[in-house]
Amino acid sequence: MSPAEGFGPVQMLVLEFDRTRFDGAILPELERLKEQGIIRIVDLLFVAKPEGGVLEVVKKSDLTQDQAVEFGAIVGALVGLGTRNEEEIVRAADAGAAELEDGHLFDDAEAWYLADAIPEGSSAAIVLIEHRWAIPLRDKIVGAGGVALADEWIHPADLIAIGAAASAPDSVGAPA
């Protein structure tokens, strides 16, 4: 088993909230999902920008420092693999490991970027969620000789947009 096979698919979510105070429901839900082995937080950066107040920044990761460095090395090596140059693969793996040496992919630059992107009185988060539930399924698919031809998330809003586009008077096949 390669080191990359120990990690599940990772989803990046970028979220905005129209407030800076919460009822405490989100982090416990993430913890519940982690305890059940469904997900793991690779990295989370949360920024709250209160009106006239001081910027609040929270960082969280479920990875140990060693796991974060290993994850960084794997991501770097996979990016380097695209170059088809062995020296570049090693360089990229080393750079990826160094990037996550502090246990976080998101740093102060991302915190300031998020803060600049949202209005006062709001909050934003970037979270990398590893889908641990998918690892056994992926392994069975690979074991059966399968490969992914497509991999997309379809959200309810996507389906609504498809319906709206299909029913537009100028769309092909739409009722007149």
Image (cartoon, grey):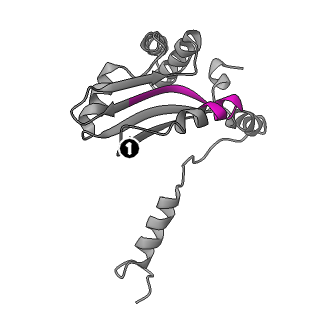
Residue 101 position in % (x across, y down): 47, 9
Per the image, the residue denoted by label 1 is 17
Label 1 crowd bin: few (<14), some (14–19), many (20+), radius 10 Å: some
Judge from the rendering whether residue 22 lies leftward or rightward of residue 115; answer left or right.
right
Residue sitting at x 49%, y 22%: 60
Judge from the rendering whether residue 132 lies leftward or rightward of residue 118; answer left or right.
right
Residue 39 seen in the current view: no
Question: Which type of secondary structure does the marked residue at label 1 adopt?
Answer: strand
Q: Amino acid at mark 1?
A: Phe
Q: Which residue range is magenta in the image?
A: 31-46
Residue 64 position in % (x across, y down): 58, 13
Residue 58 seen in the current view: yes
Q: Nearer the viewer, residue 52 or 155?
A: 52
Q: Is residue 63 above or below residue 150?
A: above
Residue sitting at x 49%, y 39%: 23
Q: Nearer the viewer, residue 56 or 96?
A: 56
Q: Nearer the viewer, residue 12 or 60?
A: 60
Q: Is residue 43 magenta?
A: yes
